[in-house]
Amino acid sequence: MENKIAGFSEMSNFFNEISEHLRHENRFSLPENLQRTVDIFCEYHYKHAITIPTGGEYWRARINPMGKIDAYESSDIGAPPKGSASSGRINPPGIRYLYVASNKATAISEVRPWKGAMISVANFVLKEDVKIVDLVQDISLPASMESNSDAVIETLANDVILKSINAKYFSTPAHAHDDYAYLPSQYIAEKLKIMGIQGIKYPSVLSESGHNICLFLPDKAEFKISEVINVKGVSYTFK
């Protein structure tokens, strides 16, 4: 089995090729070998897509400017107006998606506040069921599979691709001045959207208490209420 999946052991350089091609060669298509890797990722996650139900509560935060003591309301803390969205981890520039977090702490962490910052935190509720790709869940092998079966080999190969793409594009923050860092994750997200996926759930690297969700259709979540909180401290651990 090891020989059959050995070609997947050096995926890092392979995914760098995806990034380099989208940056410098063609923004909207990939060579066949690179596209096949993306297709494996999309097909596998489409098969394991989940539905998050109507009524689910999520959170979004925005740092208040100096002197603003009241909370931002719906039009100022929701998805940006049509055509004005800047490039994000999952959305291409100009395309408005709604990024929300599973809890307040994660939403606040995602805006990278400092001690003393005033933060508007808004509550959003899903108005209908949403079909999403879940990059947080652990998709394990069925117990009934033979250890040397072709299905196991395919799943292990897929798993390497999944973990590599997740770590490379959907979990690692980009440098603030790199306008093209998220081209691969944007490209993959657009492919998933074409397949009928309505959002992506992905880990937060800024909070251990929750995760993030990007909704391709912002109107599926309704603004409910917002409040202002004052950040009392920021903590980092390191070695």
Image (tube, rainbow, N blue to C red):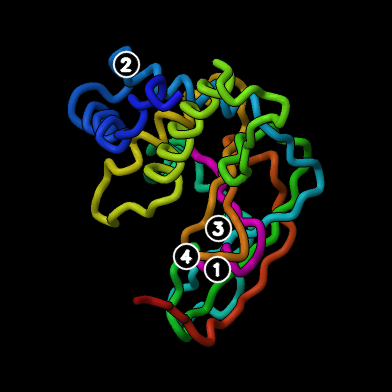
Q: Nearer the viewer, residue 117 or 233?
A: 233
- 147 to the left or right of 9: right
**Amino acid at the residue labelled 4:** Val
Q: Give the mark nearest the N terminus, 1 or 3.
A: 3
Which residue is denoted by mark 2 in the rendering?
33
- 109 to the left or right of 37: right
Q: In the rendered view, would you say 106 is above or below 10? A: below
**Amino acid at the residue labelled 3:** Asp
**Amino acid at the residue labelled 2:** Asn
Q: Nearer the viewer, residue 39 or 195?
A: 39
| Kind of element beneath mark 1 | helix
Q: What separation in Å lies between label 3 and label 4 (alpha carbons)? A: 15 Å
Q: What separation in Å lies between label 4 and label 2 (alpha carbons)? A: 37 Å
Which residue is denoted by mark 3 in the rendering?
76
Q: Quadrant of residue 28?
A: top left
Q: Residues within 10 Å of mark 3 (few under 14, many from 20)?
A: few
Mark 1 vs mark 2, foreground winner is: 2
* Residue at the image position 27 percent from the left and 45 percent from the top: 179
Q: What separation in Å lies between label 3 and label 2 (alpha carbons)? A: 43 Å
Which residue is denoted by mark 1 in the rendering?
108
Q: Nearer the viewer, residue 111 or 75?
A: 111
| Kind of element beneath mark 3 | helix
As drawn, the residue found furthest toward the top would be 32
Highlighted magenta segment, given as a residue range: 96-109
Q: Residues within 10 Å of mark 4 (few under 14, many from 20)?
A: some
Mark 1 vs mark 3, foreground winner is: 1
Dot 1 and dot 2 residues touching (CB under 8 Å): no
Mark 4 vs mark 2, foreground winner is: 2
Mark 3 vs mark 2, foreground winner is: 2
